[in-house]
Image (cartoon, rainbow, N blue to C red):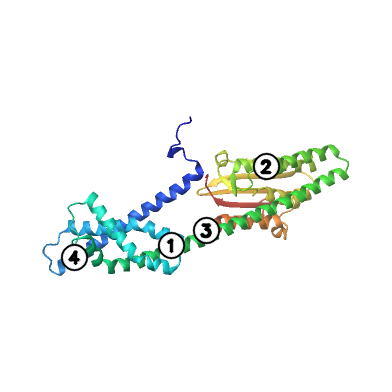
Amino acid sequence: MPPPRLALDAPESQIAPMRRKAIAALWLLGGCTTVGLLSAVHQYYTNLAEGEANTTWNDTLGRQLTYWFAWGLVVPLIVLLSRRAPRIAVLVLAAVPMSVARSAATYAIRAVFVPWLDLEPHGFVLYTRAWLRIDLITYVALVSVVLAAAHWLRATQLDAELSRARLRALQMQVHPHFLFNTLNTIAMLIRTANAQRALTVLAELGDLMRQMLDDDSRPEVPLREELRFLEGYLGIERARFPDLLQVEMKIDPATLDAHVPRLILQPLVENAIRHGIAKNTSNRVLSISGDRQGPMLSLTVYDNGPGPVVDASDGVGLANTRERLRHLYGDKASFSLTAGQGGGASAKITLPWHTS
């Protein structure tokens, strides 16, 4: 018989919800503690100002913390009720039962942790009746906070899902664009009677398509994976320019684990070859560099062609690159296509550095 599964052996899919619940519990404990301390300070000095000589700080603090910790135990019931029956009428009808539950929780906390604490008025029924008005006000405030938080979470989740859908659509847009251009390369090789090169390109294309379909849901991959895919794509392009295409890789090894958007370099390299390398009759140089600049990762694709084409930035690949960067990183990432210092064109991406 296999050994029982321990909590520490829980699958990764269960860890995230457990972590979220633990964080929510800590926030709830911290909130109850903070409100309890503030209430104790207010009540203590109010009693002193009113001349109540028998007021002590320990009793005041004990009562207030016990009261708010009891509400902390009731809040999960409010959250559960608001999810199962979010109608206002049901929440209103639950007000008095929640007050009774709060009183019961207060008595339970006192019995376990502070048995010396004197709750006034004496007796559970009298205590519950005396605190009913304050409990109802507190209940309304808590329900308002819970409903507002639930609405905010739903809106945030919808925004995240919409953003993921848009990003997915942009990523899928790269696939047919890339495939169309590669098929054009194969057709060109066949027309020029280069059957062997055409077969080589078809094999490279098959490998690339498998990589594109493998775990295609990931929006980001380590830079080393992106470069592995790019090397396959360059193998296709070398078939077009045999012995004429010189590729220089200037990648800092320390950046290989940095995460970058999936298929982010291929459109830049394709643009450099189409508008730069293909128009250069000799000494065709393509340089790909990557390095870390403080909190940012910089990736540059340079070609020694005639320079940036005026309408190149409006193409599918480069426009797609801009949109994907914006969806993933907002204003923290940038993309530019400029003339190189010694001629040619330089496409540069700057994005936040992260490895997970």
Name the mark nearer the viewer: 4 or 3: 3
- Name the amino acid, label 2: Gln
Q: Mark 1 to mark 3: distance in Å?
A: 18 Å
Against 282, residue 5 (above or below) is above
Dot 1 falls on a residue whose secondary structure is: helix
- Name the amino acid, label 4: Tyr
How would you rate the neighbour count of disc 4 (Cα within 10 Å): few for under 14, some for 14-19, many for 20 or more?
Answer: some
The residue closer to the viewer here, 272 or 285, is 272
Q: Which residue is mark 1?
A: 82
Name the mark nearer the viewer: 1 or 4: 1
Name the mark nearer the viewer: 1 or 2: 1
Against 128, residue 16 (above or below) is above
Q: Give the percent coordinates (x, y) of residue 96.
A: 33, 66
The residue closer to the viewer here, 326 or 234, is 326
Dot 4 falls on a residue whose secondary structure is: helix
Q: Is residue 79 left or right of residue 62?
A: right
Q: Is residue 129 left or right of residue 74?
A: left
Name the mark nearer the viewer: 3 or 2: 3
Q: Mark 4 to mark 3: distance in Å?
A: 44 Å
Circles 1 and 4 in contact, beta carbons < 8 Å: no
Dot 2 falls on a residue whose secondary structure is: helix
Q: Which residue is mark 4?
A: 45
- Name the amino acid, label 3: Gln
Q: Which residue is mark 3?
A: 157
Kindly indicate the quadrant of the structure image that contains residue 130. Answer: bottom left
- Which of pointers 1 and 2 lies earlier in the amino acid sequence? 1
Q: Mark 1 to mark 2: distance in Å?
A: 45 Å
- Which of pointers 4 and 3 lies earlier in the amino acid sequence? 4
Q: Which residue is mark 2?
A: 211
Q: Give the percent coordinates (x, y) of residue 29.
A: 33, 54
